[in-house]
Image: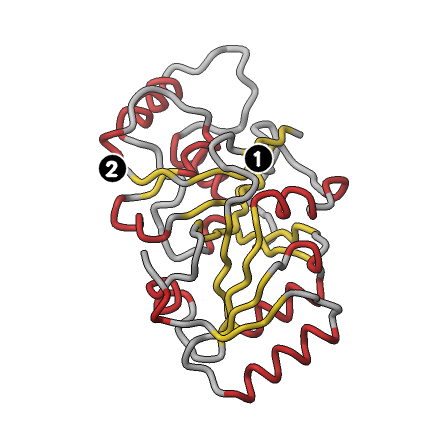
């Protein structure tokens, strides 16, 4: 398996994951980060090929090589297989919490944000459990389809998003299980990336508008799962984009 870490991500870079209580408990219970299948996320442009790349691929499928034994015959079929074999987890890159991220991804008051670093994320992964073609931790680029020219490895298209998402400052985990020579559309809706959550989680922030009982509940949950991270209430006043 190919494992790639973005060289532009420094080990001390802080990463945040905003989530509701159920996802937090699931992470602790399973000792895993959930990687959602790419076609299950809200943005239906995930992994879309830029126009230039699509034209090149269409020409390829019109005139396939006689030696090509792949069952794929069209660009749309190729894309459908890719999104059903790419599994992602999205993290926010910042050195402080972010008000916009609370509003978008912590929509209810009973939500939290966990903080880690690039270094800890890389260290806490249980790599022996990884299976597939590639595993990538990389910055997302924000640009229009027309700004992408030439041919790129197909995994890279899952790290390109439209500019209006730039506020997310996303660092993405991607697990690719694509096999061009197999029937690969009937895949699970996600994968569990097994981690040591006590090493992963360096700080827990609860929603700034949450009630005191929720802070008590998160403290009790952290104690149950032996999480040693500090637990604090978030603050809109100290956030920035």
Identify the residue at the far top of this view: 66
Label 1: few (<14), some (14–19) or many (≥20) C-alpha neighbours in 10 Å: many
State the residue at coordinates (44%, 49%).
Answer: 93
Residue 136 falls in image quadrant: top right
Residue 78 falls in image quadrant: top left
Can you tell which of label 1 and label 2 is closer to the viewer? 2
Q: Is residue 146 above or below residue 12?
A: above
Residue 22 falls in image quadrant: bottom right
State the residue at coordinates (61%, 68%).
Answer: 230
State the residue at coordinates (49%, 56%).
Answer: 16
Picture coordinates of residue 127 (x, y %)?
72, 40
Picture coordinates of residue 69 (x, y %)?
56, 20
Q: CA distance from mark 1 to mark 2?
A: 25 Å
Q: Is residue 40 above or below residue 171?
A: below
Q: Is residue 178 above or below residue 152?
A: below
Residue linked to disc 2: 144
State the residue at coordinates (37%, 66%).
Answer: 238
Picture coordinates of residue 103 (x, y %)?
35, 69
Residue linked to disc 1: 178
The N terminus: image quadrant: top right
Which element carries disc 1, helix, strand or loop?
loop
Which element carries disc 2, helix, strand or loop?
loop
């Amino acid at each position: 398996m190919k494992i790639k870490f973005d060289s532009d991500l420094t080990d001390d870079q802080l990463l945040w994951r905003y989530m509701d209580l159920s996802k937090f408990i699931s992470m602790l219970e399973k000792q895993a980060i959930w990687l959602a299948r790419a076609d299950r996320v809200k943005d239906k442009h995930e992994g879309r090929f830029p126009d230039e790349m699509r034209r090149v691929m269409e020409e390829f499928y019109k005139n396939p090589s006689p030696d090509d034994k792949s069952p794929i015959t069209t660009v749309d079929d190729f894309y459908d297989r890719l999104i059903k074999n790419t599994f992602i987890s999205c993290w926010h890159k910042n050195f402080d919490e972010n008000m916009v991220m609370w509003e978008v991804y912590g929509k209810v008051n009973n939500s939290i944000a966990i903080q880690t670093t690039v270094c800890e994320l890389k260290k806490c992964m249980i790599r022996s459990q990884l299976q597939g073609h590639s595993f990538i931790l990389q910055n997302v680029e924000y640009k229009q389809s027309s700004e992408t020219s030439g041919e790129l490895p197909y995994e890279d298209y899952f790290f390109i998003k439209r500019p209006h998402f730039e506020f997310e400052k996303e660092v993405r985990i991607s697990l690719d299980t694509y096999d061009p020579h197999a029937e690969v559309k009937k895949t699970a809706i996600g994968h569990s990336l097994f981690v040591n959550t006590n090493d992963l989680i360096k700080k827990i922030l609860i929603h700034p508008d949450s009630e005191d009982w929720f802070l008590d509940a998160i403290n009790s949950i952290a104690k149950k799962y032996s999480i040693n991270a500090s637990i604090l209430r978030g603050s809109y006043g100290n956030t920035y984009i």
